[in-house]
Amino acid sequence: MTVRNVQSGSSRAGHALRWSVEQDAALDEAVGRAADGIPTVLLVEGAPGTGKSSLLRHVAASAPGFHPLYLHADSDWQQPYAALVEWGVLDGPPDPGLTSLQAARMLRSWIQKARSGAPVLIAVDDLQSLDAESSDMIARLVERTLSDRLLVAVAADSLARESLEPWHRLALDADRAVRIELTGLDRSAVAELVTTTWPAADPALCDRLWAHTAGNPLFLRAIVHEHTLEAVRDAEELPAPRDLARALATRLERLDADGAAVLRAVVVLGDRWTLSPTAGALAGLDDCCDAVERLCRQGLLVTRGRQGRPEVRAASGVVRTAIAATIPPANRRALHHRAATLVDSPVDALRHRFLAAHGHDDELAAELEAAAWSMHLARRFRQAGQVGLWASAATSDPVVRERRFLDALFDAVMARDFDSVEHRLARVGYAHDEARRRLVEGFVLVGRRRWSRASAVFLSIPTALIDATDRRTRLRLRILCAWIQAVTGGPAERVRHELAVASADLAAEPCLSAYFGFASALADDAGTAGAPAHVAGGLELGDAWRGVAAAVAGLPDLAVRNLKPFTAQIDDGLVTVGDGEFHALLGYAHWLRGDWPEAREVIRASLGARYGAANPMVRAVAVLADLAAGDPGTLARHRAEARSVLREAPWPEAISTAVTTEFVCLRLTGQHAGQTRYLDELNAHFGTITWRGTEPALWQLTLGMINAAAHRTAAVHDLADRLAVNPSPVGWRDAGVAWLRGLAAEAAGDLEAAARQLGDARARGLAALHIHAALLASDLARVRRALGDETGAAGAQREYDDRLARIEGAGYLIVPTADPLAPLSDREREVAALLTQGLSYAQIARELFLSRSTVAFHLSKIYAKTATRSRHELTELVRRR
């Protein structure tokens, strides 16, 4: 059997590996078979540092009672049959004529005497370094042993080596071989290992280290213990473990000249796949195929592609870094200089020219800056940031060098590399261009969703500094200043002013078009009429904005119609805008209109966006995925997480969405105390929410319900008045106004007026707001019950239950009535019981010795008292008890 899997192992306290269930099962099978008298070989393959030695120790611990023979092979000790000498089978060098079969019989006889009847475990680590005679002898022992309690466990980097051909043959024998391939830790285990030592390490760095080391736990532990977080985080090239670097330097000295030249050439060419002829040309060889093949067998290079012209690269990032460190600087620069003439990519050529430079080179710096701007325009921001840093490093003038450095950091923010930017920016305490430095500082805060602090940074920049900076930086500042003011409820006049100035020069920075478009729509109060059809850069946002505004205003059908195609474009990679907020609002719209399965899936997709969990709109609706899945117990946790994000990023639309979500959830789950104190909590967290233009109609309705729960009658009347004149095209406006007036009347103690207004609201209808329609029915049932109108209350309550029952996934929220037949007399209960069992009028009459007219009379009374109209409705009512 063969077990191939990435280790889920992690470093608990940075030391122990944890083996997978599959690996432990394979070990148990191997030990069990050997203990039962079936000679078994356990073959462990993996690159250096993947845990082969640890696994062999785990084998020994899993085989109690076995007589152990352990050997760690050493490539420097190549005496024939060294294993026989190491284990004491021979006292001195073997007879020169000793064959592997003879040696195997000799080892078997010695084991029979030494084992005292116990099963035997032979464990050999680094099998590839064992002398060929010993290796062949042990393989022959396994092959020739047909029935014995023998377990041979060997570990090697690869069984594909020619010297290990007998072991490769054994691996194909399914009756006696168990094979485990170790391929390193997975991403989550690497993150756990790294953050154990460096708690502040960000996920991007953990991913870089995972790729650099191929998940090798030995290499990872060495790197995090030999270097500081700051040094590794800022390094363009991640380091190699010192022991590995020394070992590879020694191996490099032993390589033939062609092999060493090819290895150095591949390392200089970088971490990308390179055609072997290119590597050969850089190494000065007409044909490097033999050298490449030898290096691959030694685990230093890997290849892919067709034979004769394969692509080649270093076996791992740590190998590449370690070999690079052995090349003298002058030789390395010369290789980079030559590589610049051999590579196909213009960016690669610039990289090699930069690495070949010795000191400042202003001509090269200008070319690098131009390349970085081209990458910026192509929205390859991470690459643009890196090339911009090269441009800065190659610049002699300190003022220009700083400008290029800050521009590179701006691109790094666009690429969301926030940790690195903050760390680098901290070194710039004072800048020649202070407006540019504050631009980067504020933009990082925007990216981190700390919008209140970002607003403070942007608004603190004096006009004189803005005027003194260059055209592109001025434009960036104006767009971001307008955007941050728009999303945090700043003065609409200032937002419009900044946008008006920026609109005259949008071509200078097309990559902020999404910020400009949204700020424009918010400032102009575009609402469901939509933003301008096109904004800078050709990005289409009109339909998307209409969908956003519709969802917030309480028009879920319109929201779904506009947001669904737009989110599909995001899913297909055709549009790269936002961090899940469009999916969040689409899910919210689905939830409002009762499409709960769709809501659950779309909201989960928004949470799965790379930065979705930190987006205020995503956090505002996150609880709905759980509510729609039948798990309302997470409301408190989700509310705390939403408040934490919204305090940092007080986007009014997100706050109103969160408030509607939370309060409706409180109502659906019957948390009356939470509803009563909700207004005080809302004021404590957010105070008065400022809207630039028209208040969303759904916000006014929600706030009215919240004030009613807190018995603030005057505030409810005021919100009803504001909703009555709201210009948004919501078809449920009149019903919403009547609903709020009914709640105000109830709070004032006028139950008759409350019932009248709520009944009027129900008659007018709430259009696509299916959840709210259910809540309205619940309010009407409460008021009629307070009036003593049990029949009317039962009818309204049944409407509430029916509306929830029609929503897939919401049925669990229905609270069964204790006894829906309680208002009936004894005779009426008898008639109802028989009717719901399916009996006809005639059958009921015969059963109860009544006339059919008497049965009909009782049924009319039953229908009236239970607010039902037919046999079917009455049966459904009884069924839901």
Image (cartoon, rainbow, N blue to C red):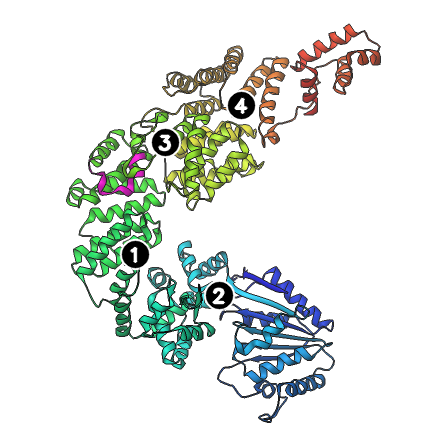
Residue designated by label 2: 217
Image coords of residue 565 (percent x, y) = 43, 34
Label 3, label 4: how far apart the Cα atoms are: 29 Å
- 255 lies above or below 793: below
- Tell me if I can see residue 881 in this picture: no
Query: What kind of element bears circle 4?
Result: helix
Image coords of residue 444 (percent x, y) = 32, 47
Residue 506 lies in the magenta stretch: yes
Instruction: From the viewer's perspective, tell me whether residue 281 is left or right of residue 494.
Output: right
Residue 528 versus residue 233: which sits nearer the camera?
528
Label 4, label 1: how far apart the Cα atoms are: 55 Å
Residue 386 lies in the magenta stretch: no
Q: Which of marks 1 and 2 is nearer the N terminus?
A: 2
Which amino acid type corresponds to the residue marked 1 in the rendered image? Gln
Magenta segment: 504-517
**Mark 4 or 1, which is nearer the eye?**
1
Residue 572 versus residue 638: which sits nearer the camera?
572
Label 3, label 2: how far apart the Cα atoms are: 48 Å
- How many numbered tags mark residues here? 4
**Mark 3 or 4, which is nearer the eye?**
3
Residue 386, numbered circle: 1
